[in-house]
Image (cartoon, coloured by chain):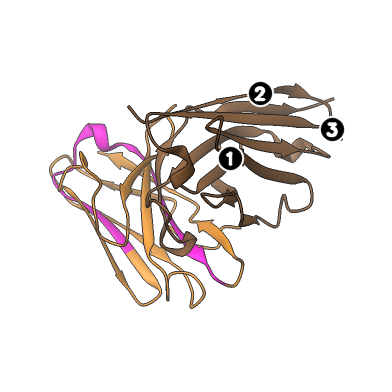
């Protein structure tokens, strides 16, 4: 079955870096755009970044642009989120999600499969 | 502050209908489709409605979506206790080149 499994979360000090991974299985990973979404404790969903199916196009939320980098390795069916210069307000559960449409355009897309999430806590 | 505006809460009795609104602008809901997500307590979000009014396989037809101009709505009919959850609308914003979410609506079954 289609599955996404995040890893790499943990406790990190402000200003440090962390790299999240999202392992995909059960579908042709290289056909779908992939997304990162986070949810701070007790708060709503916040979209962070998207990478196109082939890695050629990437977009970021203003809150993380310049600090976070999304990437993918289609040969390993894995999505990444490199997080630098972490702040206390980056504390959240981080979810990866798959786009609904193969080779779909971002403006038409939806997140049809989500991972279970990985918790990132930024604290001194 | 979320770009899309949703009421923080909505409620209705079992078996009744509840509607959740989502208000946007000419850069997001105006030209683009809206998607709705359901998040049960302690769980990851789940796609409920995509492309304004389409249900993924497995989503009951008690859930329906609509969009008109820069506003959208999600309706739940025959409300059940298992529908108690947070509901989020989302859409692509062409001015921001970003996906924008609503703040979420907590549905309570009275």
Q: Which of the two residues, B13 or B57, is positioned nearer the viewer here?
A: B57
Q: Which-is-in-front pick, marks 2 and 3?
A: 2
What chain is tagged by disc 1? A
The reply to whether residue A44 is visible in this rendering is no
- For this orientation, the residue located farthest to the front is A75
Discs 2 and 3 carry the same chain letter: yes
Q: Is mark 2 on a helix, strand or loop?
A: loop
Q: In this view, does B29 lie above or below B12?
A: below
Tell me what residue is drawn at x 44 percent, y 46 percent. A31
Is residue A71 located in the magenta-colored stretch of the structure?
no
Q: Which of marks 2 and 1 is nearer the N terminus?
A: 2
Chain corresponding to orange in the figure: B
Instruction: Please tell me which of labels 3 and 1 falls first in the chain.
Output: 3
Q: Residue at x 31, y 69 (%)?
A: B67
Which corner quadrant holds the N terminus of chain A?
Answer: top left
Q: Are the numbered discs 3 and 1 placed on the same chain, yes or no? A: yes
User: Which of the 4 image quarters holds residue B64?
Assistant: bottom left
Residue B28: image location, x then y, percent = 48, 70
2 and 1 marks in contact (CB < 8 Å): no
Q: Identify which residue, A101 or B73, lies in the foreground.
A: A101
User: What is the quadrant of residue B22 in the picture?
Assistant: bottom left
| Secondary structure found at label 1 | strand
**In the image, is residue B100 above or below residue B24?**
above
Reading the image, the residue beneath label 3 is A14
Q: Which of the labelled discs sits on residue A38, or is there none?
A: 1
For label 3, count other residues whose C-alpha is less than 10 Å away and answer few (under 14), some (14-19) or many (20+): some
Res. B46 visible in picture: yes
Residue B13 on image: x %, y %: 19, 42
Residue at 15 percent of width and 48 percent of height: B61
Above or below for B73 versus A48:
below
Q: In this view, does A89 lie above or below B6?
A: above
């Amino acid at each position: 079955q289609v599955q996404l499994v995040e890893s790499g979360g943990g406790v990190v000090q402000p200003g440090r870096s962390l790299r999240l991974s999202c392992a995909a299985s059960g579908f042709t990973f290289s056909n779908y755009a992939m997304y990162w979404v986070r949810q701070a404790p007790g708060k709503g969903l916040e979209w962070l970044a998207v990478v196109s199916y082939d890695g050629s196009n990437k977009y970021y939320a203003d809150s993380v642009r310049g600090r976070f980098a999304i990437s993918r390795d289609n040969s390993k069916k894995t999505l990444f989120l490199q997080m630098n210069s972490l702040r206390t307000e980056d504390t959240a559960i981080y979810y990866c999600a798959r786009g609904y449409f193969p080779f779909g355009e971002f403006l038409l897309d939806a997140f049809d499969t989500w991972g279970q999430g990985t918790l990132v806590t930024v604290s001194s | 502050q979320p770009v899309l505006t949703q009421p923080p809460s909505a409620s209705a009795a079992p078996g009744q209908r509840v509607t959740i609104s989502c208000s946007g602008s000419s850069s997001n809901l105006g030209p683009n489709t809206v998607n709705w997500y359901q998040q049960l307590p302690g769980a990851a979000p789940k796609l409920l409605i995509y492309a304004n009014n389409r249900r993924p396989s497995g989503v009951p037809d008690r859930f329906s979506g609509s969009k008109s101009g820069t506003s959208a709505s999600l309706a739940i009919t025959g409300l059940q206790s298992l529908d108690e959850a947070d509901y989020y609308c989302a859409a692509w914003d062409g001015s921001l080149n970003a996906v924008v979410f609503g703040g979420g609506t907590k549905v309570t079954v009275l």
